[in-house]
Image: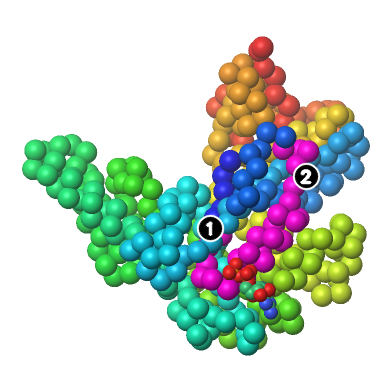
Amino acid sequence: ALTAGIVGLPNVGKSTLFNAITKAGALAANYPFATIDPNVGIVEVPDARLDKLTELVVPKKTVPTSFEFTDIAGIVKGASKGEGLGNKFLSHIRDVDAITQVVRCFVDENITHVAGTIDPIDDIEVINLELILADLESVEKRLAKSSKLIKQKDAEAIIEVPALEKLKAAFEAEMPARSVELTEEEAKAVKGLHLLTQKPMLYVANVAEDEVNDADNNEMVQKVRDYAAKEGAEVIVICARIEEEIAELDDEEKMMFLEELGIDESGLDKLIKASYSLLGLATYFTAGVQEVRAWTFRKGMKAPQCAGVIHSDFEKGFIRAETVSYDDLVEYGSKAAAKEAGRLRLEGKEYVVADGDVMEFLFNV
Ligand code: GDP
């Protein structure tokens, strides 16, 4: 499964946020085969379309799709040089698909800050620099090998070396790999390095309880937003403490609580949605009377691969997929009515599935 790793300096609110994630966590019953790793929190992806489909179809059961966060505690200054448990943490980041960086934007005299003062940009730069230094080391090692091969006119090295040089120059200027423009060939050549700063990054500004509704007046949040804008990254404002409280409420209580706070969506729900789209993920649905269910796929996946998300047999024996868009299904009210109106399509192996498709797969067993 795809996962976003939560990183940040000590005392910024990572554990508080991660607690909120595990408490709000998806019903274990829906994921009987999920490995139970204490550092992994499975969340349900909120999707209003699923509620609407449930209303239309009235199934026995409705199952949302899920998404994982991994808690990667403990990055400190010097991690790339092995400080603290540095290298171990960096290797955990290598395994995640996107990075969620928690940044402290609350002032609380009772909670010390590792650097003594609270400056969110300094904090971000400490973390980002550790990631860049780790990447620089990977690139330099690789470059030492490839430079020898290039002398022997090795075809791969001829593509790889200029790409490595570009990356190295960026890292030396303290810029992430994300900022480097590589050709498709070059990107492929360096993919095996699993560079940390190539992963998409989302910043989470953790604000005080009374500022969650007034983030525009929080100078620290503004600074984070400006910084992220330069990188083309997104910022989500949350109050981790409030999220922890919300996570203990049932749906109705949650709605009332959010209304009291004057917000329409919990920070955690915003974070889940943003992480999901950051990873290039989308949702299709199956909508039978037994079960209405949301499934996650990567944008660009074709119908057989999407069928494989449910079961590998569906992919192997794929024949075609009866498909109707969510909007059409809602407009016509039922699959039969959509069919009558000519909105039900039979899609084959080459069909690129769209977000919101409602699908039924036909396959050979
Ligand atoms: P971590 O070291 O990054 O995992 O940080 P923790 O989640 O353990 O938080 C450090 C301290 O900050 C704890 O005492 C939290 O209760 C507190 N804290 C976390 N989020 C907030 C917040 O939104 N507001 C305030 N006032 N305190 C917070």
Q: Nearer the viewer, residue 171 or 10?
A: 10
From this view, report whether residue 39 is shown above or below residue 249.
above
Label 1 SS: loop
Q: Nearer the viewer, residue 240 or 294?
A: 240
Give the percent coordinates (x, y) of residue 225.
Answer: 54, 75
The residue labelled by disc 1 is 72
> Quarter of the image containing the C terminus?
top right
Tell which residue pokes out farthest to the left in this image. Answer: 151
Give the percent coordinates (x, y) of residue 350.
Answer: 55, 27
Identify the residue at image location x=18%, y=45%. Answer: 146
291 sits to left or right of 70: right
Whether residue 351 is visible: no
Identify the residue at image location x=58%, y=56%. Answer: 71
Whether residue 135 is visible: yes
Label 2 SS: loop
CA gap between label 2 and label 1 equals 23 Å
Q: Residue 152 lies in what quarter of the image?
A: top left
Residue type at numbered disc 1: Ile
> Quarter of the image containing the N terminus?
top right
Residue type at numbered disc 2: Leu
Stretch of the chain drawn in magenta: 6-31
From this view, report whether residue 152 is shown above or below residue 23.
above
From this view, report whether residue 365 is shown above or below residue 284.
above
Identify the residue at image location x=66%, y=12%. Answer: 364
Give the percent coordinates (x, y) of residue 169.
Answer: 25, 63
